[in-house]
Image (cartoon, helix red, strand yellow):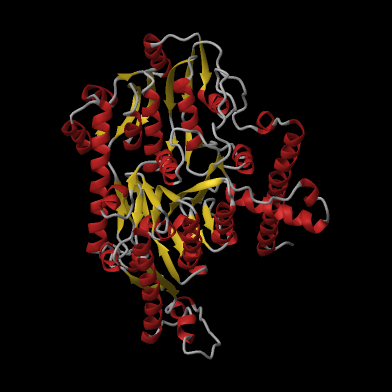
Amino acid sequence: MESMMDKLKRIFLGILKFLRGYFMMIGILVTVLPLVLAWIASRSGTLGAVAGHYGVAKGPAKETRLDWALDGVLLEQSPDLSTRFIEQFFRRQPGFYLPEVRRALKAAAADKNVTSLVLNIFDLQGSQAEFEELRRALIDFRKSNKPLHAHVAQLDDNLLYLLSATDSVTLVPTGEVSLTGPAFQLVYFGEALRKLGVTVEVIRHGKYKSAFEPFTTNKPTPETMEMYRSMESSLADHLISSIAEGRNMPREKVAAWFKRGVYTPAEALNAGIVDALGYADDAVDRIEEAAESEEDMDFSDYISVAGDEKTPEGKSRKATDQSQGLALIEAVGEIHMTASAGGSSQDFIAADDLVKEIRWAAGEDKAKAVVIRVSSPGGSATASDIIWREIRALADEKPVVVSMGSYAASGGYYISAPATWIVAEPTTITGSIGVIGMQLKFPQFETKYGVSFHTVNSSDRAKMLNPGSMSTPEDKAILAAAIDDVYQTFISKVAEGRDLKVEDVDRIAQGRVYTGIQAEKLDLVDELGGLPDAFRTAKELAGMDVEKLYPILRYEPDRPSLSDCLRSPWTMMECLQYGGTHAITMAPSVSGKALRGVDQLRQLTSEDRVLAIWPGWMSRYFL
């Protein structure tokens, strides 16, 4: 008779076999399908029609209202074909790549057949900086004097900020309104770890460097509270001022909205937070009163039209000068040495891959300047330094403009520092110029759980290597010296890149995190703005005509062709491994968000002992 243990073992093995087959199937699809589509495109030039994400190729011929179901995720990094396929396979919201959206809104503003735009929003996700960039694009569209209305099921800080760029906002009669303002929710569990027998040894340089503080204490230090209160105040001030300007309301009135926080739909209407209560068709009726249209069109379809070589009016959308261009590099996510060190994270910066892109930009004669989009909380200090060196060498050859996204903190700022010019969003989280090291220790595991650790090593660092033993004072002194050395290198390179004195950088560094607004006042960034501002500055620095259109050049990595994958069993397995790994990182995880901190802690402890990372990933950041 089968025992319970054998039954559980059989079930477990069955699950493993299923998962192995499942992800192998996804690997095949992810690897082979894009290759087949690329082959078809090379033969017929119809990649957009065969595999296009939006699926139309014809603009409006009559007076048309654009309807935009703005649900999904705002993306700072361009998704490749494989990523888009996986998202659709798992029926995930595909998301909106901000440069594509901005280009489409600009085209719609100039399109004589587009009469108006209606936004229908139920679940839009993104950082405050991403909402900032989309809001700026909506403001530019509104300058065309075409009606822009919005319909929402609920309203929070981000949405009200975004929709302050529209003509009117209609809220579902049973919708929710929560305007509590920016908030950092910090979770501390130092005592919980101690009860489990876990001790976290942390050595840092920078009194504000609080990345692992939640593992060691039960409450924030005074320096941590000072830092977060300062950022919250800066973000709230920008949020309230921008909404007041967009809604044409006194600043004091908008501040009162956020002071109270929660409203019923009727109260929101009476307070002037929204303009009407109703449903999607009511919003359409309002906009039709302002500008009648003969047809309606999905804005997601219009995005694909805006990417065509011709405008809806038939005019060429090609760059006016093809002899030179601007290179664009996207550096989004945590910084690691290699792609394999990124763990299950979908967004990460692999130093070895990014170095290839940077060297390509340096050697591309057509690229007269380079724009690097940085949105990173940092990560490996060593990987950050390798990237820094390449960007510095690139800046010696041609102008380099960094455009900071949601955050460019710690290692993210490290790699930005050598740029010729830095542009940040007002709400970008940046700075965190500091270094931290940590080790997990389990000195009570033998007593509590009967688990002991034994390290066979002849060096003086044997106790430091042993998870069951606390590090000696000499161990900690050696690690502290290493961290101090990295910190001094960090502030020296920031001083060099920003043309500041080392002592001045040290004074404002210390691991402190700033908003983009604060960073500009401290000369850590040069200008507040978005990616379009970065491109304009890049053209100015390169001596190019800022009014002309130039091609945006992107690095194309070498990918195996279909024939390469089918050449031998070995190459086929390599292709499947690539596709399967990509599928696993893309697959939605039920526990992914809940285990985010644990997953990042695993990544951090498995790579470098010395880190340059900001503490925000330990926070639940409401913006």
Q: Quadrant of residue 324?
A: top right
Query: Which residue is depicted at the point 60% across and 48% down?
Result: 555
Q: Which of the image's four quarters has the C terminus?
A: top left
Is 178 left, or right, of 330 in this rendering?
Answer: left
Vertical placement of residue 474 versus 334, above or below:
below
Vertical placement of residue 352 versus 484, above or below:
above
Is 286 left, or right, of 468 in this rendering?
Answer: left
**Residue 19 in sight:** no
Q: Quadrant of residue 189?
A: bottom left
Q: Which of the image's four quarters has the N terminus?
A: bottom right
Q: Residue furthest right?
A: 568
Percent x, y of residue 440: 44, 73
Percent x, y of residue 183: 29, 47
Percent x, y of residue 609: 46, 72
Q: Quadrant of residue 437?
A: bottom left
**Residue 600 in sight:** yes
Is 478 left, or right, of 346 in this rendering?
Answer: left
Is 272 left, or right, of 497 in this rendering?
Answer: left
Query: Which residue is depicted at the point 68% across and 53% down?
Result: 578
Percent x, y of residue 351: 54, 60
